[in-house]
Amino acid sequence: MVRDDAPWSPARPGAGWRADVAARGARPPAALPTASSPPAGVPLEEAPRRRRRTTASSSSRLRSLYLSLAAATVLVLVVGVAVVPHYGGGDTAAGTPAADELRRPPTDAAWTLDLAGLLAPDVPPACVHVWPSAATDGLVAVGTSVDLETDDAASATGCRRSAVSGNTSRVALVEAGTGRVRWVHDLADDVPDADALAIPASQVVPGAGRVLVQVQTSGGAAQVALALADGAALEVARGRRDLPAVSVAAVGRLQLRAVGGTDDASRRFSLVDAGDLTSPIWQGRADVGTTPLLLASGVVVEADGRSSFVDGRTGEARPLERGRGTTVETAATGPTGDDSLYLVERAGRDRPTVSAVDPIGDRRWTSDVEAGALAVTDRCVLALAPDASSVTCLDRGDGRALWSRDLGGPSRVVPVPGQSRDDVWVVAQRDDGPELAALDAADGSRRVALPLGPSDDVVAASRTVVYVETDDSGAGPDAVTAYDASGGRRLWGSTSAGRAAFWGGALVVVDDSAVASRLVDRTRVGSTS
């Protein structure tokens, strides 16, 4: 007997199949309509019209599909453009070093240098405080002092002993990029009475071929000039015990010193070139309540109610005012190659104006834009309003106002080492605290803004990263935080127990044992990751 579930040959028909219907050639009910036959229940005379509607519906669906696809493509493109970060140009501003692009936490050391062993081998490392100069042409002069505030109780006795013996008189010239030590010089022979607790102040002056180191001695301040090439002592300038000289400012190879006196009326000023510390270029007085303004090319002095510019090369003074009663409120110089002197002048009670003055004292242009402060960049003269709430960009060539920007509160323009020529960095005081913002130098539009803490300071910038340092003034180690220079996103923060700072464009951390390390990120990632 054949089982009902045995395979049929041919295949078993589906349910509802009728032999008489099949014999007439009709389709079984389960069959789907095809494109060449009308659906079941549709009269034959309506089939062509229904086919046209079906074709039309298909075309409509295709058009809808294409439109949806196109809209999605446009959305992707728009969103993609919106999230593409915008950074300044690749060139750094004149005179500023290029800073490292550290978009990820730098955990590798490009070089390590034991500064305690190099500069103060007789002092316990925990007692050594390192004092680097500002980097110039990639070179940093490093001095040390004895730090009595140490967390290491075992080293406290050694620190006090070292403060008496004064074994911190060495100075080193270090290449910030490589960590190579060019030379070490011991100041003990030059200034044997130097105070081991005092902070040494160093300056690298390539234009004069010198490294200047100022120390405190039992007889007052002394300044030693060392040869940039090999560290040999060139000269020592000591102030008189009864007439001490205090360095007020240093710009490039020029120094401004205040000599003697306890008040403005008795104080004299001297202008000194780094190439000759003992022969001032100029000496003179300034009106009570005023301080000479030192620039890279000379000094602006207010004396007897008149403003003059003293040339830093010759010491010759030339008047700046256009008439009696005209005063120079502030001045600035341009980047390398720009020989103009930019002034904010006020005639009597008139509104202050901005002028550009050529080397012989003639005015190249004058703008009626009110200004309380000036900053000159590669792109323009930035005139900050008297209330510091807005800034105007003036063309350096003819004084035309190129753009103005409301800063929303008292602000200051901050030069940032490594910044792009396309950026203008400003710090504005807001109700909820200070804010750092980058303006596009071309049109003044704000590209990025990020909040700052009360003790934060912007210390460096690369093309895509801006670095902010927090100085706790001894309460804790300095910390560096990196932010994206386009969106302001926080990228990372330093967690080292040492003091982090930028030596030129290199991030260097000095730990509690006075060991310095340049931190880098060796991970190869996209330019904006």
Image (tube, helix red, strand yellow):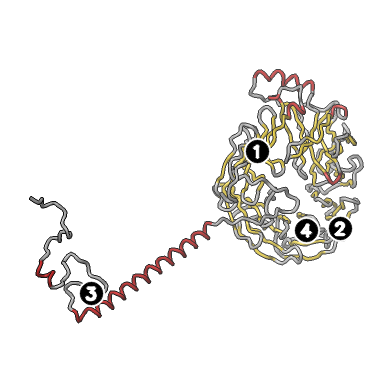
Q: Residue at x 63, y 57 (%)?
A: 439
- CA distance for labels 1 and 4: 40 Å
Amino acid of disc 1:
Leu
Indicate whether 425 appears above or below 138: below
Residue 467 occupies quadrant: top right
Residue 226 occupies quadrant: top right
The residue furthest front is: 1
Amino acid of disc 4:
Tyr
Q: Which residue is drawn at 80% across and 49% down?
A: 294
- CA distance for labels 1 and 3: 78 Å
- CA distance for labels 2 and 4: 14 Å
Mark 4 lies on residue:
342
Tell me if 502 is positioned left or right of 250 in this view.
left
- CA distance for labels 2 and 1: 50 Å
Q: Are marks 2 and 1 in contact (CB under 8 Å)?
A: no
Q: In terms of secondary structure, where does tag 2 sit?
A: strand
Q: Earlier in the sequence, mark 2 or mark 4?
A: 2
Q: Nearer the viewer, mark 1 or mark 3?
A: 3
Mark 1 lies on residue:
519
Q: Which of marks 4 and 3 is in front?
A: 3
Residue 27 occupies quadrant: bottom left
Amino acid of disc 3:
Ser
Amino acid of disc 2:
Pro
Q: In terms of secondary structure, where does tag 4 sit?
A: strand
Mark 2 lies on residue:
319
Residue 339 percent location from the top left of the image: 82, 58
Kindly identify which numbered label has been placed on residue 37: 3
